[in-house]
Image: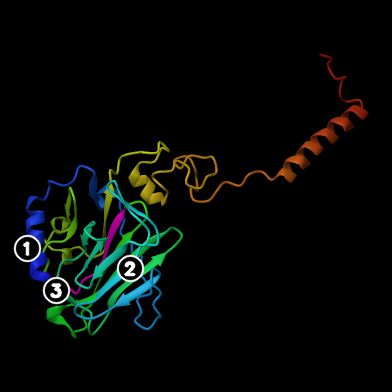
Amino acid sequence: MKSLKILSIFFVLVFVGVGQASAIYELLGDSDGLSYGWEGTRASRLLAETPGEYQFDYGDEANVSFPLPWAFDFDGTTYPAGTNLIVSSDGSVRIGTGGPFVAAWNADLSSHFQGGLFVERKTGPERVVIEWQTETFELAAMGQVNAFEVVLNPYGAIRVNYKAFDGSTTEDAGSGLTATGVNLSLTAESPTGAVPGMPQTSHLFLNDPQLDGDSDQLDNFGEYLANTNPGNPDTDNDGILDGQDPDPLIPAEAVPAVTMLTLICLIVGMVLWFRREGRMGPTPSC
């Protein structure tokens, strides 16, 4: 609304050179093996809010400041736990003051009559989900709700999922990820030249997808798909590299000591029995 023109100018300047993206962060989609997915939140205006767990707002100029529950690593910078995610009803989120800026859909949006802006922490694995259920400002109160979300994990991955658009607008003032040295456009990914042309699609901003920085036989994209830590070769600390572990998030069960003791006793018992029955020769001398 009031800030949309400023944002539009900002994104025109930022994305004028699409294709000159950072050599580190990349934008991945279905052609890279990323399937569409939807996380969702509880998305209710009636639930009690708990800072850092579940927060929401709604209206024409809604905003949520949501403290990160864990440190977030982005392009060599660590944003500590407690850093605020500054989320706007106009489809954007900024990580901290002056940090990465994600415009999932840079448009004039309103959740005054329906929907809202919902932010929720989820676990197993850890992530923060930011969900927009919103109408466009021009069609407010018409019941044509659009749904999309941004999902962050502690390792610097930023995923954008587009669930549904009402089909009545092609508005998009320039959507994507911007940060120091990182300019990646979502708008340019759409066959229609606007985010509403990409329903039922997912897009992932990821640091150096083909790098295996912890030498665990999984590159960063593989780590993302497996929900493992790209900085720890053995995420579940069970002695098996993540790339070799059939379930890298659940430690392999060690053989219980009592089982080993039982096995030893069984072997000794069998040896003694064979000796008594004369079925075993004398023990060789050293």
Magenta span includes 282 = no
| Residue at 83 percent of width and 16 percent of height | 284
Quadrant hosting residue 195? bottom left
Provide the major secondary structure of the magenta segment.
strand
> Counting residues from the N terminus, which is met first, the one under dot 3 or under dot 1?
1
Chosen colour scheme: rainbow
Q: CA distance from mark 3 to mark 1?
A: 14 Å
Q: Are marks 3 and 1 in contact (CB under 8 Å)?
A: no
Q: Which residue is mark 2?
A: 66
Magenta span includes 166 = yes
Where residue 169 appears, as percent x and y from the top left, is 12, 72
Where residue 71 appears, as percent x and y from the top left, is 37, 55
Q: Residues within 10 Å of mark 2 (few under 14, many from 20)?
A: many
Q: Are marks 2 and 3 in contact (CB under 8 Å)?
A: no
Q: Are marks 2 and 1 in contact (CB under 8 Å)?
A: no
Look at the image and tell me whether residue 149 can be seen.
Answer: no
Is 193 displayed left or right of 259 in the figure?
Answer: left
Q: Classify mark 2: helix, strand or loop.
A: strand
Of circles 2 and 3, which is in front? 2
Task: Tell me the kind of residue under disc 2.
Answer: Phe
Q: Which residues are magenta?
A: 157-167
Q: Which residue is mark 3?
A: 108
131 vs 181: above or below: below
Task: Tell me the kind of residue under disc 3.
Answer: Asp
85 vs 237: above or below: below
Where residue 188 appears, as percent x and y from the top left, is 13, 56
> Counting residues from the N terminus, which is met first, the one under dot 2 or under dot 1?
1
